Image (spheres, helix red, strand yellow):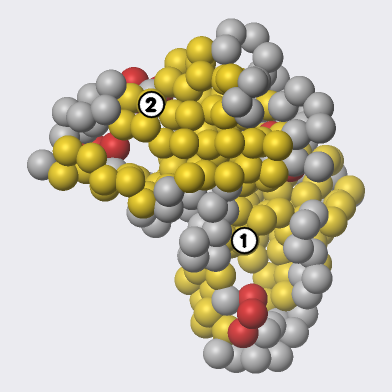
């Protein structure tokens, strides 16, 4: 009963390095989302996807890229990490029938 | 445009006391409203949602919220707090059925004292 799985859970990067966060869901949901959560703030939408092969920008897309090559996977990439991207990243998928979001456990990224 | 304000970043109650977490929203169309709970080192979990049916919405773990259009509010309540309710709570508003494109509040941390 996996639901939404994020990897890795923790990562430390140096400024300028690149990395990819993987989100996988086993609920056959079309809609998937990437958020960042910073202290004292709610979630902010980075990018989202309404289906395989489609992506769109959210509220804070700069510095991030995404891909949805397979329906079950949604990848978030940082091409050149900056300290401002230190955050906890959450992935979610949406049940279209109920509108309920299912979240992963988060990926904590530190950029030095 | 949609926005949400959670009044009080920290709320502390005694075990068995009433829990009241406040949320006010702004929306240019009839809103969809949500409350989520986040336990330490976990993702958010849906507590309840309002989608223009009954104004009093019951959720999981004994929580409920009332939609008041005149006050643009969607406050979360629970009659009797339990230690396991200690967590961070987020209110969110959406102007369409895509819950994932909601605007989230800054969160309220609930502490429950024994």
Q: For the residue labelled by badge 1, is the local secondary structure a helix, a strand or a loop?
A: strand
Instruction: Reply above or below: A89 against B111.
Output: below
Crowd rating for badge 2 (residues with CA inside 10 Å; few <14, some 14–19, many 20+): some
Using the image, name the chain to which the residue with label 2 belongs.
Answer: B
Outermost residue, top side: B54
Report the front residue among A31 and B19. B19
Q: Can you identify the residue that label 1 sits on?
A: A36
Give the quadrant of residue A36: bottom right
Residue A40: percent from the left, percent from the top? 49, 61
Residue at horizontal 72%, vertical 27%?
Answer: B31
Q: CA distance from mark 2 to mark 1?
A: 27 Å
Using the image, name the chain to which the residue with label 1 belongs.
Answer: A
Residue at horizontal 48%, vertical 45%?
Answer: B7
Residue A90: percent from the left, percent from the top? 58, 55
Q: For the residue labelled by badge 2, is the local secondary structure a helix, a strand or a loop?
A: strand
Residue at horizontal 51%, vertical 25%?
Answer: B48
Instruction: Reply above or below: B81 against A17.
Output: above
Report the front residue among B68 and B48. B68
Give the quadrant of residue B40: bottom left
Q: Can you identify the residue that label 2 sits on?
A: B77
Residue B77: percent from the left, percent from the top? 38, 26
């Amino acid at each position: 009963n996996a639901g939404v799985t994020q990897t890795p859970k923790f990562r430390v990067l140096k400024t300028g390095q690149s990395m990819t966060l993987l989100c996988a869901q086993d609920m056959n949901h079309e809609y998937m989302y990437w958020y960042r959560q910073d202290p004292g703030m709610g979630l902010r939408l980075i990018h989202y996807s309404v289906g395989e092969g489609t992506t769109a920008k959210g509220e804070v897309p700069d510095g991030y890229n995404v891909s949805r090559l397979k329906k079950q996977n949604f990848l978030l990439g940082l091409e050149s990490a900056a300290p401002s991207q230190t955050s906890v990243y959450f992935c979610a998928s949406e049940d279209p029938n109920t509108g309920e979001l299912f979240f992963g456990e988060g990926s904590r990224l530190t950029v030095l | 445009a949609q926005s949400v304000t959670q009044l009080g970043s920290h709320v502390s109650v005694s075990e068995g006391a009433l829990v009241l977490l406040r949320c006010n929203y702004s929306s240019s169309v009839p809103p969809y409203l949500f409350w989520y709970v986040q336990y330490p080192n976990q993702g958010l979990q849906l507590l309840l949602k309002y989608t223009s049916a009954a104004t009093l919405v019951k959720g999981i773990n004994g929580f409920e919220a009332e939609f008041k259009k005149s006050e643009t509010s969607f406050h979360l309540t629970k009659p009797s707090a339990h230690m396991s309710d200690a967590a961070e709570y987020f209110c969110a508003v959406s102007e369409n059925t895509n819950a994932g494109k909601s605007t989230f509040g800054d969160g309220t941390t609930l502490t429950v004292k024994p």
